[in-house]
Image (cartoon, rainbow, N blue to C red):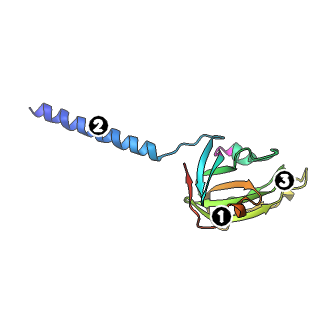
Amino acid sequence: MQKNKHLVIIAILMLIFAVILLITKKNRTILQDHQITKVQIGNQEIKVEVVNSSSSITKGLSGRAQIGADGMLFIFPNQRQVTFWMKEMKFALDLIWINNNQISEITTNVPAPKENTPINLLPTYQPQSQINMVLEVTAGTAQKWHLKPGDKFVIR
């Protein structure tokens, strides 16, 4: 009889563990480098290309003629102060600085640099506070979508 009680208790604990694992997995989105995914930002649902490897973050949109999706989302493993520069960019951008699923700042109309500008002469851009994501969109998009600091940002 005692052995059966132990088996029942073990079975119940295993079931509870399995349910917790499923709930945790459902709430934890694992995004791959260069994956296209949907996000909700302000009142807009858009498709973004995710970059989260150090080499992809460094390259960003350099050399591209267009974004490809509605934006490029840079995801960092933790909050940090970041600095962006626009090496070999071909078009102007808006930089949407995001922290804890909320827009913290927006830098609009960042111009593409003149061709062959040495990296040490490129202007740099950074938010005033730490962030964990940056969304790059074509210049003018933040105004067109009526985005503002405080707007929610949710990865779908």
Q: Residue at x 55, y 58 (%)?
A: 101
Calculate the distance from the C-alpha at mark 1 to the C-alpha at mark 3. Answer: 30 Å
Classify 10 Å Cα crowding around label 2: few (below 14), some (14-19), many (20 and above).
few
Front position among marks 1 and 3: 1
In the rendered image, residue 108, in percent from the top left (x then y), is placed at 75, 64
Give the number of the disc on residue 14: 2
Q: Is residue 51 magenta?
A: yes
Mark 1 or 3, nearer chain start: 3
Disc 3 target residue: 119
Tally of marks = 3
Q: Which residue is mark 1?
A: 147
Marks 2/1 in contact by CB < 8 Å: the verdict is: no
What is the distance, in whole Å, between disc 3 and disc 2 at their CAs?
A: 56 Å
Q: Which residues are magenta?
A: 49-54
Which secondary structure lies at badge 2?
helix
Which residue occupies the foreground of this view, 42 or 3? 42
Does 68 sit above or below residue 152? above
Q: Are dots 3 and 2 in contact, CB under 8 Å? A: no
Q: Position of residue 155 (x, y in %)?
A: 56, 50
The residue under the point 75% across, 62% down is 125
For the residue labelled by badge 3, is the local secondary structure a helix, a strand or a loop?
helix
Residue at 84% over, 58% down? 122
Give SS at disc 1: loop
How many residues crowd around disc 1 within 10 Å: few (fewer than 14), some, or many (20 or more)?
A: some
Image quarter hosting the N terminus: top left
Q: Residue 79 falls in which quadrant of the image?
A: bottom right
